[in-house]
Image: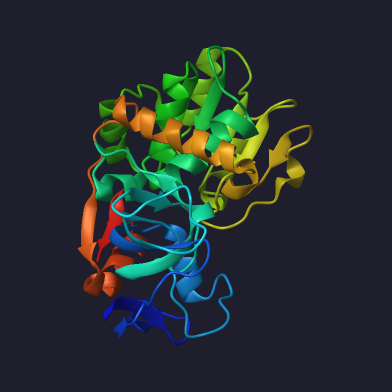
Amino acid sequence: MSDVVRMYRQGEAEVLKLESEDVGEPGPGQVRLRQEAVGLNFVDTYFRNGTFPVRPLPAVIGVEAVGTVDAVGPGVTQFSIGQRVGYYFSPGAYRAVRLVAEAQLVPVPDDVPADVAASVLAKGLTAWGRVRRVHPVGRGTLAVVTGATGGVGSLLASWASDLGAKVIAVVSRPEQVATLNALGLGHVAVAGTGDLARLVAREGRPVDVVFDQVGQAVFDDVAGVVTKGSTLDLVGSASGEIDPSRLAGVRVTRSSTGEHLAGREVLLGAAEEVFGALRNGVFGVREVRGYPLADVVRAHRDVESRSAGPAPVLIP
């Protein structure tokens, strides 16, 4: 028997219940994965609290994890027992052991700790989709990243900067500026203060792309700096949805991570880039905060209160 977290209804964090299950043997095309770290993402709270529908119930939420293969089913050819692997979007992650399709797995380098890998894979692939597909960035790009101290935002801002873009990072509180300065991001605006407009005006040219994860709370700031020909990519909407109808001539995009990872080779290549950027220090030092699986209720409360940091994980 192994641990699993189930919910029998959607609601507050207390609906998450630690139970036991018998996982069994993998079927055709599946591996059995002994999970070492489960990624904890803000979107998990949406599946829990009813923002996103979950059917049928009871259900196991969570979408990413890293672990070691301990059994393989018939027809599995890409992975073997003892190999370290991870997945970025396969619902049902909040458990110690699980069965997962071979096609959803990517290799995890031996020199990347499991908790670090689980904290960066889904978020890193989301960032990859933005800087490589939605609006490829490079030298000469002027990019704005909102929510830049968050899980995706911190990776996105650092990666775009490393690729040569001039990045203006937007934070919600003045005390967060130093955090981004430590990552090498020297152009940081505090939302609602006029900082963003001043920093953009200093550049003397239009913003090429805004990667926005915040939504309503920063919309006035963002609307003041995008112009005809700019791209506003709606990565997320933590403070509520925006109405882009007032943004005449602005290209507004919204897409899921999976839309940019069509095909096995694309996924493997993107994951390799994410781990390469991590290894090369592009994302700085990952300060992972681990919660025992049994403390999942506290972990969700911390994520919702923004006190879990940018890299929380569950440890089975």
Q: Position of residue 142 (x, y in %)?
A: 55, 20
Q: Residue at x 34, y 77 (%)?
A: 5
Residue 181 against residue 236 in the figure, above or below: above
Residue 180 against residue 86 in the figure, above or below: above
74 or 123, which lies in front?
Answer: 74
Looking at the figure, which quarter contains the N terminus? bottom left
Is residue 220 at least partly visible in the picture?
A: yes
Q: Position of residue 259 (x, y in %)?
A: 65, 46
Colour setup of the view = rainbow
Q: Is residue 39 left or right of residue 164?
A: left
Q: Is residue 131 left or right of residue 311?
A: right
80 or 126, which lies in front?
Answer: 80
Q: Position of residue 224 (x, y in %)?
A: 62, 33
Q: Residue at x 51, y 48 (%)?
A: 214
Residue 194 against residue 314 in the figure, above or below: above
Is residue 148 at least partly visible in the picture?
A: no
